[in-house]
Image: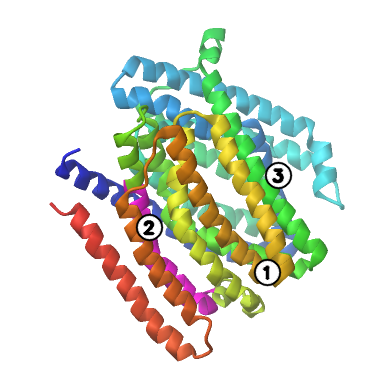
Amino acid sequence: MSKTQKKVTYSHILKYTGLFGGVQVITILVGLVRNKIVALLLGPSGMGLLSLFNSTTKLLSEASNLGIPTGAVPELSAPFENGDRQTFVQRVTMVRSWSMICAIVGMLMCMVMAPWLDQWSFSWGKHSLHYVFLSPVIALTAITGGEMAILKSTRQLKALARVSVVNVFIALVASVPIYYFMGERGIVPSLVLMALVTLLLTIRYSWKQVPLHISLSAQCLKQGMDMVKLGLGVVVAGGLGNCAEFVIRSFISHHGSVEEVGLYNAAFMIIVTYGGMVFAAMETDYFPRLSAIKESGAKLNRTVNQQMEVSLLVVSPLLVALIIFAPVLIPLLYSGKFIGVVAMVQVMVLGLYFRALTLPLSYIPLARSHSLMYIFVEGFYAVALVVCAIIGYNVYGLYGVGIAITVVAVVEFLFLVVCMGVKYRYRLGRGVASFLAMHLGTGLAAFALTLQDNCYLTYGIGIVLMAIAATLSMIILKRKTSD
């Protein structure tokens, strides 16, 4: 690869990391406003009802969509990258056909299971009919997932960003009047409406790439078996992660208290949200690019290492800021009652340095449609997380869980480097190693500041460390993207 091509690639990664990071920020801010208004309109019981309906429909969607939103991307990316229009159109038809089947099956499953969903979700009232009326959400979500995969594979990244931003604003404008006039009775119509809006926004762009065509022939459906196998691997791997989180929360609940579960969940959500602001571009931009590379060796290594470098350089100054200002941020996002989770968050942030590196590595098996390999690495992470979290909680309580999560992040990174090296001949770039050493040093220095009691010293030197980390990242990124 020429020097100019490398600079273009770095510019591309940085551009779309910033684009989807900005989308995440807008989504979070508008979501906070919407949640605040909805909470005032519905009250605690209404918010609880909304949460239960949301979590149930999400669970049914993930169980019935066969992982097509992820599994379809490698199937579509290769022919699109190679310019094979005929094969690409055939595979788009196959993806849409499978998505339609998943939509029908998921909707019927929600309707049939409505009485049991009511029993499992509620200890009061009768909500079976609510789940019947929510069944279109499952169908609409399944179809949207297939159309999203088409946009990702065709690199319609600006369209994806536009859909996300417009969708979150429509959710604010449309749902608030519904809740204002209908109260809790408006929850189900609101969820169905938003699922429909998301689909309409998506197909506005995806149908421009390939006009709608569906075929339920045996040959068409047979072509999708590799996609389904990979998708099921994604579903299984996601289930392992959800099980790990469930076990940890249950363990804390039984050996601690419900309040500690709430604190743990608050810390977990802060880390996920903060990391998502930078890592959002992984699935929408990086995954399709990686899926188009079918050979192991230099091109694969270069693509993965470049993504790792940019992710680390962008996220590192933000991580220093989170470590230093966690005592201010957490009460602002929640309340003063959550101040006890500050130390846990600060130690968990150190794990995000390694998370920025493990995510690009973990996409390699997915890009190759190696579902068993993906399940293996995700299973290793889930088991390690549960074991270390339990040990950490028994020794240091919630702070010990934070330490455990960071330790597992380090172990997972080393494990993936070895596994990807053996399976796909991946080699860690020198730039990645040097940038990690440099920025992890500023992160550890910031963390060390939090261990002493002088807040003026912490904030004073912490701001200097933030400036150092930001300056280093900007100098390196400018050098890599300049003409």
**How are the colours assigned in the image?**
rainbow
Residues 367 and 82: in front is 367
Give the quarter of the image for residue 116.
top right
The answer to whether mark 2 and mark 1 are in CB contact below 8 A is: no
Question: Of discs 2 and 3, which sits in the foreground?
Answer: 2
* Residue 318 in magenta stretch: yes
Left or right: 252 in relation to 105: right
Give the residue displayed 52% in from the left and 8% down from the top. 219
Dominant secondary structure, magenta: helix
Residues 225 and 387: in front is 387
Where disc 2 sits, the SS reads helix
Q: CA distance from mark 2 to mark 1?
A: 27 Å
* Stretch in magenta: 306-329
Q: CA distance from mark 3 to mark 1?
A: 28 Å
Q: Quadrant of the N terminus?
A: top left
Q: Is residue 58 visible?
A: no
Q: Amino acid at mark 2?
A: Leu
Give the residue displayed 74% in from the left and 40% down from the top. 131
Q: List the residue tagged with mark 2.
A: 312
Q: Amino acid at mark 3?
A: Thr
Q: List the residue tagged with mark 1.
A: 398
Q: Amino acid at mark 1?
A: Leu
Q: CA distance from mark 2 to mark 3?
A: 35 Å
Q: List the residue tagged with mark 3.
A: 56
Give the residue displayed 26% in from the left and 64% down from the top. 474
Give the quarter of the image for residue 290.
top left
Nearer the N terminus, badge 3 or badge 1?
3
* Residue 260 in magenta stretch: no
